[in-house]
Image (cartoon, rainbow, N blue to C red):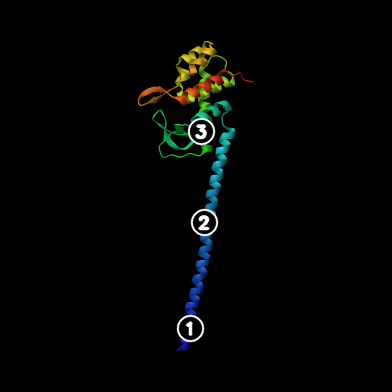
Amino acid sequence: MALKFITINNYYYRLLVTLGAFLIIDTAFSSTVIAADTQIHIQENQIQNINLNNAIATGPRVSPAAINLVKQYEGFRSYAYIDTSGGPVIGYGQSRIRGRKVKMGQYISRAEADAELAKELYRIQSIVASKVKVKLNPNQLAALTSLAYNAGIRVVTNSTLIRKLNAGNYAGAANEILRWHKANQGGKLVPLAGLIRRRQAERQLFLTPYK
């Protein structure tokens, strides 16, 4: 009887040892898979950051003065919000990211916002350059690009400002910048202190000789 008891215990002992070995192997395998999966996600994030940095480094050339003006007066927000026009924007007041309209609840990194801003400012800068028939120095182009980014492309497509500029009246065009200082508030266009300061800064940049 004692021998049978020992035999049964030995059987269960060997079974437990075998199961324990499988558990150890399975745990080690799972840890390896989790570690590998984590490493893949880390590498994917690193690749994404590298791509964003490359987009900024190799992206279209835009005057630093235009970028600085926009960033200064727009400010940066990583989340979507409603601006004075009544629509959702994100980052530096951007209404579109990667060609798609911004939606409430959306988030963005500063690196991606920088890359998208550079592309959008280059697009606007190209339109400004195509509509202006007189020579512009980099400061004048930067001021008009900042203005068009904030007030809309209509500034350089159908305005007294662009007509005066194309007639060679640079001083008159600079003064026209100050007129774009109103925003929609409750269905009415009203002057805003922030826009007044921004227009003054853009006018000053427009009149600043480029060295």
* Amino acid at pointer 3: Glu
* Amino acid at pointer 2: Ile
Of 50 and 109, nearer the camera is 109
Q: Nearer the viewer, mark 2 or mark 1?
A: 2
Horizontal side of residue 189 vs 28, given as left or right: left
- How far across and how far down the image is residue 164, in percent? 50, 12
Circle 3 Cα neighbour tier, 10 Å, few/some/many (<14 / 14–19 / ≥20) = many
* Amino acid at pointer 1: Thr
Which residue is at a point 59% across and 34% down the rendered structure image? 57
- How far across and how far down the image is residue 159, in percent? 45, 16
Residue linked to disc 3: 116
Which quadrant of the figure contains the C terminus? top right
Which of the 4 image quadrants contains residue 189? top left
Per the model, the C-alpha gap separating discs 2 and 1 is 40 Å
Per the model, the C-alpha gap separating discs 3 and 1 is 74 Å
Q: Nearer the viewer, mark 3 or mark 2?
A: 3
Q: Mark 1 falls on what kind of element? A: helix
Q: Mark 2 falls on what kind of element? A: helix
Residue linked to disc 2: 34
Q: Nearer the viewer, mark 3 or mark 1?
A: 3
Most distant residue in the right direction: 211
Which of the 4 image quadrants contains residue 67? top right
Most distant residue in the front direction: 193
Which sits earlier in the primary sequence, circle 2 or circle 1? Answer: 1
- How far across and how far down the image is residue 58, in percent? 59, 33
- How far across and how far down the image is residue 101, in percent? 42, 33
Circle 1 Cα neighbour tier, 10 Å, few/some/many (<14 / 14–19 / ≥20) = few
In the rendered image of this protein, does residue 62 appear above or below residue 133? Answer: below
> Which numbered tag is attached to residue 7?
1
Q: Mark 3 falls on what kind of element? A: helix
